[in-house]
Amino acid sequence: MTDHNEYINNKRSDFSKGTLTETDVDRDPFIQFESWLKQALDAEVPELQAMHLSTVLDNKPSSRVVYLRKMANNKFWFYGNYESKKGKSLEQNPYASLNFFWPELQRQIRIEGIVKKATLDSSDNYFVSRPRESQLGAWASAQSNVLQSREELEKRLIEITNEFEGKPVPRPAFWGGWVFKANYYEFWQGRKSRLHDRICYELKNTDWNIFRLAP
Amino acid sequence: MTDHNEYINNKRSDFSKGTLTETDVDRDPFIQFESWLKQALDAEVPELQAMHLSTVLDNKPSSRVVYLRKMANNKFWFYGNYESKKGKSLEQNPYASLNFFWPELQRQIRIEGIVKKATLDSSDNYFVSRPRESQLGAWASAQSNVLQSREELEKRLIEITNEFEGKPVPRPAFWGGWVFKANYYEFWQGRKSRLHDRICYELKNTDWNIFRLAP
C-alpha cells in the first residue's frame, strides 16, 4: 500500500497533451472558453461544469464548488440560497473568481469578475427545471445555518413535502441565481517540466488585451 | 453531438456514494483529513493532491491549483515562486483557503487558514527532490511576469541549462515553500436530492468545535 505522505511528496505529472499559443486562441475569451468547454465535453471530462467559486468576506477568501448552469457573452450563471455564506459574501463584496480544472486535458481556466443577482425570470426558469426533490430540498434547508442533527433536516423535508403535496413547488424568495461577469481570463495548458502555457485576457474598456504570462 | 449549453443546464449528479455523521468523524480534523486522503489514494482519484488555493489582493479573490507536497498537524505545504501573483498576494494578506474536490468519491474538503513562508530548510529539501528540469524551469521563469513569446522562455531555459551544466542547480532565493495553517475545515459528502452532509470544525483557542451545516 502506498504511503500517502510519500505519494504527495513524490507524485509528479508531466504534461504533454497540448500546447497553447497566442495565435491559437480566439480574440474573444468567451468564444475561447466555449471552445475549451466543448472539447471537455467531447473528452467526457467528469463534472466539467463544476467550478470553484471564490468569494471574500472580511478580507478572507472562501471557496466552494458550484455548478455552471448557463453562459452567454462573458457571463456565467449559477444558483443557490441567497442566505448562504456565499450569498452573504457576495452581498458585501461582489468581486469573485472562478476556476475550472480539467486534469484529463491538463487544462485550467481562471476567471475573475463581478457577481450580481440574476433576474427573477432567470431564477424562476431555472427553479422550475429542477427535479421536484431538489425544489423541496431548497425549501427544507436553511443553507449554512447550523443544524443540530441530520434528523432535523430530514424532518423538515417531510413537513415541506406534505405542505406542497399535489401542488407545484414555488421558488422560495431566498433562492435564486447569480450572474458572474468576467473581466479577466487565464487559459492554462500544462507543459513539460513546468513550462506551462498561460494565455491571459484583460478587459480594457471594451477591448480584450491578450498576453502570455511566465509559468 | 451533445450541445454544451443543454448539457450544463441539464446535467445532474445524484450523490449516493456515502454519508457522513458527527459520530463518524475524528475529533481532530487533521486526522479526518488524512483518513479521507488515504481513501482518495485507495480509490485512485486522479490528481488528488491538486488543491485550489484562493488568496485576496485588493479585496478581490483569485484562485489557482497548487500541489500539496507535505502535511502535518493541520499544516499544509506547497511550493512555488515568491514573486508570483500568489506570492505577492500572500505577502500582503496571509488569509487563504484550500479546496479539495474529489468527484469520484462525491467529496469536497474546504479549509480556511493563514499562510506563511516555509523555513529555508524545508524549501531547500523540497527543491533538491525535484527533477533537474523543474529546477532549471524555476530559474528560467519569472512567474506571472508578461512574456513577449514562448520563445523568450525557451531561450532563457537554454541559457540557464548551459550556466548550470555539470553542476547541481541551487534553489533560487525567489523560490520556496509556504505553510498553510488551518483554523477551519468543512468535510462535504454529496447526498441525494442536494441534502448533502457538511461537517465542520472551527478552532476555538486550542479546541476544535464540531458542528453540522445545512446543505
Image (cartoon, coloured by chain):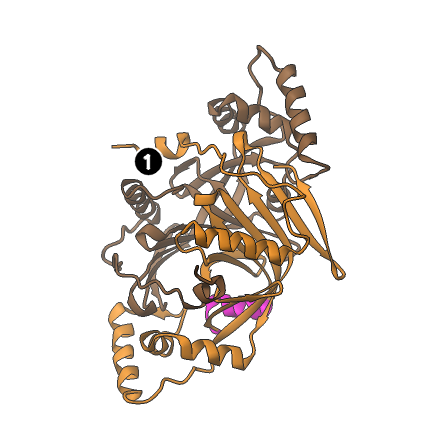
Chain colours: A orange, B brown
Q: Name the amino acid, label 1.
A: His
Location of residue A170 with respect to B143 vertically, above or below: below
Disc 1 is attached to a residue of which chain?
A: A
Q: Is residue B18 magenta?
A: no
Q: Which residue is at the far top?
A: B166
Residue B126, x across and y down, in percent: 48, 27
Residue B71, x across and y down, in percent: 40, 38
Location of residue B24 with respect to B177 vertically, above or below: below
**Badge 1 is on which residue?**
A4
Range of magenta residues:
A82-92
Q: Nearer the viewer, residue B143 or A210?
A: A210
Residue A183, x across and y down, in percent: 66, 59
Circle 1 SS class: helix
Residue A174 visible in the snapshot:
no
Residue B54, x across and y down, in percent: 53, 51
Main secondary structure of the magenta stretch: helix
Q: Quadrant of the N terminus of chain A?
A: top left
